[in-house]
Image: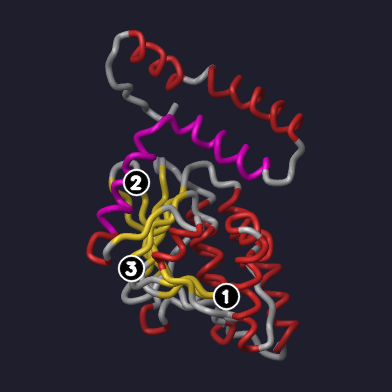
Amino acid sequence: MQYHTIKVDTDGATTTITLNRPERLNACPPQMADELRDVLSNPGAARCFLITGEGRAFCSGADLASRGEQGVSGGRAAYDALSRSYNPLMMQMAHCAVPIVAAVNGPAAGIGCSIALAADLVVAGNSAYFLQAFVNIGLVPDGGASWMLPRLVGKARAMEMMLLGDRIGADKAEQWGLIHKAVADDALMEEAHALATRLASGPTLALAQMRANIWRGLDQDFSTALHNEAVAQRAAGDSADALEGGMAFLQKRKASFQGR
């Protein structure tokens, strides 16, 4: 697939996806969502994805105006775009076979906020902010925001973000537990790359099982979570990385995981 709204660069076992519409603050049309989903569904040799934005924004939200379709407008257009493009992207992020790191530069608004927060680890520059601005234009949060936010920060703070539509800066986002870490703007990509490199050198199959169990566990009872952990442990325990990890422990050396 040829990409027109994103850039994809692979460095070793890390693949960086850059949202690349800086003239629109990386506003995300359905085409961008489709291109993102295509990359994330085909990791190839990648053992970690890093998502960031070109220029001075991560993603300023959806861009339905660029869909290029005629005769469909308003709520119908939003419903169709969500059903066909944005929601499948969010599901792909949840079910991705490798970890995802988000490096948030500038605004992450609307669907951009959802994309960022669906990553496993989110690093934000100090000038970044997270915004659910739907209330200001008479719409409702989408992209899974109404499911993710209460689980990330609790009901009261989720209500604050969605009902008031105020910006949540990087420092507050870290204090709330919304993101992993807030850093200086000029240290953002270095911090994010270090995280991605660390994850890419980890036991890939075990990491995939971990993130799958966390996503599933958000809606499961305790006994089901215990069962899923046992199933995942069986799969991870049979991997070459588990054998290497055990040998490294016994030999008192650092494990060298190969992602197998």
CB within 8 Å, label 3 to label 1: no
Label 2 Cα neighbours within 10 Å, binned few <14 / some 14-19 / many ≥20: some
Q: Main secondary structure of the magenta part?
A: helix
CB within 8 Å, label 2 to label 1: no
Instruction: Name the secondary structure under disc 2.
Output: helix
Q: Could you tell whether 119 is left or right of 228 in the image? A: left
Q: Residue 52, percent across and down?
A: 38, 63
The alpha-carbon separation of the residues under discs 3 and 1 comes to 18 Å
Amino acid at pointer 3: Asn
The alpha-carbon separation of the residues under discs 3 and 2 comes to 18 Å
Label 3 Cα neighbours within 10 Å, binned few <14 / some 14-19 / many ≥20: many
Residue 172 picture quarter: bottom left
Residue highlighted by disc 2: 195
Amino acid at pointer 1: Gln
Amino acid at pointer 2: Leu
Instruction: Name the secondary structure under disc 1.
Output: loop
Q: Please tell me the numbered disc located at residue 132.
A: 1
Label 1 Cα neighbours within 10 Å, binned few <14 / some 14-19 / many ≥20: many
Q: Residue 64, percent across and down?
A: 59, 82
Residue 20 picture quarter: bottom left
Mark 3 / mark 1, whichever is N-terminal: 3
The alpha-carbon separation of the residues under discs 2 and 1 comes to 27 Å
Residue that extends furthest to the top in the rendered view of this protein: 250
Residue highlighted by disc 3: 126
- Magenta stretch? 189-217
Image point 68% across, 42% down: which residue?
Answer: 216
State whether residue 215 is above or below residue 119. above
Residue 181 picture quarter: bottom left
